[in-house]
Amino acid sequence: MAVGFSVLACGLMMAQSASGEAAFRPPAIPLVTHDPYFSVWSMTDKLTDGWSKHWTGANMAMCGMARIDGKTYRFAGELPKDTPAMEQTSVQVLPTRTIYIFETGGVRLTVTFCSPVLPDKLEWLARPVTYVSFDAAAMDGKAHEMSVYLDTSAEWVVHETAQQVVWGRFTIGGMQAMRIGTKEQPVLERTGDDTRIDWGYLYMAAPANAATVMSNDKTARNGFAEKGVLPNTDDLRMPRRANDDWPVLASVLALPIKADQAASAHLLLAYDDDYAIELFERKLRSYWRHFSPGIDELLQAAERDYADAVKACAAFDEVLMAGLEAAGGEKYARLCALAYREALAGQKLAADFDGAPLMFPKENSSNGCISTVDVIYPAAPFFLLFNPALLEAQLKPVLDYAASARWPWPFAPHDLGCYPKANGQVYGGGEKTEKNQMPVEESANMLILMTAIAHVEGNADFSARYVPTLAKWANYLLEKGLDPENQLCTDDFAGHLAHNANLSAKAIVALAAYARLCEQLKLADDAHRYRAAAEDMAKRWAEMANDGDHYRLAFDKPGTWSQKYNLVWDRLLGLKLFPSEVVEKEIAYYKKVQNKYGIPLDNRKDYTKTDWLIWTATLAQSREDFDALAAPTYAFANDTPDRRALSDWYDTKTAKMVGFTARPVIGGLFIKMLADETTWRKWSKGGSQ
């Protein structure tokens, strides 16, 4: 446990930070965040200023109220309008928890949303369960009669609110469990980007002594608001549309407060999606079923682990926040705390036919692709830091696809399909044509990531079975990587570009990385050949890209510039390929051209990428330069008028979101933690313990 660091200092809103600066205002606040479907956020400063929403912006309403000495107040949601809002004094966003504090009527109410997504404890990480905890204490030294109400609407289980839903209740291990889902249950039928799940069931599990009801929103909410009670019977008028008198699952928990003793209670919110992913026509179960065969066992296990889980999450948050602040400062720590659950909620952990974990990222808010290689690449620092096995679980389906007869090209694929169906590449030319592919981009990404895994694990065992495929990609980069032809790269929103200097740098680093991998695989001749080629290409790159006090966007375009974020792997992997003067010259130039909210991606537009900007800042050798380049990203997150999950594509002059939200690539912000070898190895081997 770190000493001398208060997590309260790094998450508070409406209060000052430990350094005395104004507190951080996240653009959106994670509440229930597990996968691309079970992903619910508050997009307002106060929890009572609006409904909670799915990352796509669709309402996933949650109403919370507290009744204190016969008077009712709201702590979550817009309605009932005539019920006054509690005074929200702070909100704290930590890696695994979001903590709201309200003070009204002589009582302090703390509401905590805890998702125990600890990367070295897969049983907990895989569980689609969030604990909602209520802790109440007297502020005035008096006893108080108190109870809390929470409901979730049918919006959580539909893609469109005109879809019909059904509901029911069960007794599970001494708990009351209510569930709701669509009547049709079109399992894995809907694909795309701006989509919500419309199969499986949402569960609310409450203690046996709680009052619970399945009812329409007005009856449940008004009953508690006016008299502090719920209807005596469930509303069984079903099936009906989700927007027809808005069915809700509602629970009331008693929290009687003694003058000198706090009161506590909690609920469980869970989602059973039945099947999670389709991989080459095979339906895969969610990985949590590897530990619990069904929802009954899942809820009982989650309830049994409640005390241990919340304690472990508090300890994890404390240690991680201290490590983040030591690596990059208080502002960097705040950004990463916000990014932590977003990085995981853009992924789905499923079980292969043999029970092995497979992880599938969704390209949220761009095109909905699944297992996009240039999404896995920027997200990788998160997984390399916390659990490299999870990065292997992302890469394995891509590698198996590329090694199969289905993939006809000598370069790496872009994706495996459209989420949640991983049945083959859909982007660009797919399996049919080389047009609109990303050949240099994806091949280099894969080689760098495979080497990074071997670097942190100390062996190349994972790569050994894929050597023929990796060698094919390395040979492709030997031929095409130094001066890339007109093609797309991961920054494809900027269009095609020939002679791309940053893309070339990636290819060169990838070849040197592959040479390192060959050393570990005892392929001495290949190691020498690829290393020599990379060294020669690096020298030629410095000449071709040189533009005086910086390096060009494209070799044939003098007077241009771009972020060379791909060079960061030369440093992280200790390849010692490019002279330090190259990076020093670039860093000095970036400080000249950056705007209020950061360095533009290149000279063509004012927009930037959040992930790449932090990668570029990590190139800096001094903490002073890192702070100078990274701090504007914090300012963007704090100032942006767009209330969505942390964006990775925004305007550096206005702080407005250009596009992209809730994408797993935000895990790339953790790259600064990889710059120190000791830190990297500590965390990848369970450094939270």
Image: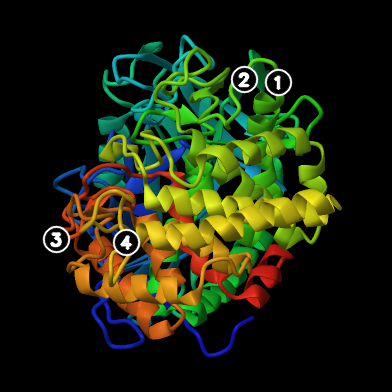
User: Upstream in the sequence, badge 1 or badge 4?
Assistant: 4
Task: Residue at 70% x, 72% y: name it.
Answer: 682
Q: Residue at x 18, y 50 (%)?
A: 605
Q: Where is 123 relative to 6, above or below?
A: above
Q: Which residue is mark 2?
A: 407
Residue at label 3? 653
Q: Alpha-carbon distance for marks 1 and 2?
A: 6 Å
- Asked whether residue 340 appears in the rendered view, the answer is yes
At label 4, the amino acid type is: Ile
- The residue that mark 1 highlights is 404
Q: Are marks 1 and 2 in contact (CB under 8 Å)?
A: yes
How far across and down, in percent of the image, does residue 164 sit? 37, 13
Mark 3 lies on a secondary structure that is loop
Vertical side of 32 occupied by 220: above or below: above
Q: CA distance from mark 3 to mark 1?
A: 46 Å
Mark 2 neighbour class, 10 Å CA radius: few under 14, some 14 to 19, many 20 or more? some
| Amino acid type, mark 2 | Trp
Q: CA distance from mark 1 to mark 4?
A: 64 Å
Residue wearing tag 4:
68
- Is 333 situated left or right of 508 in this image? left
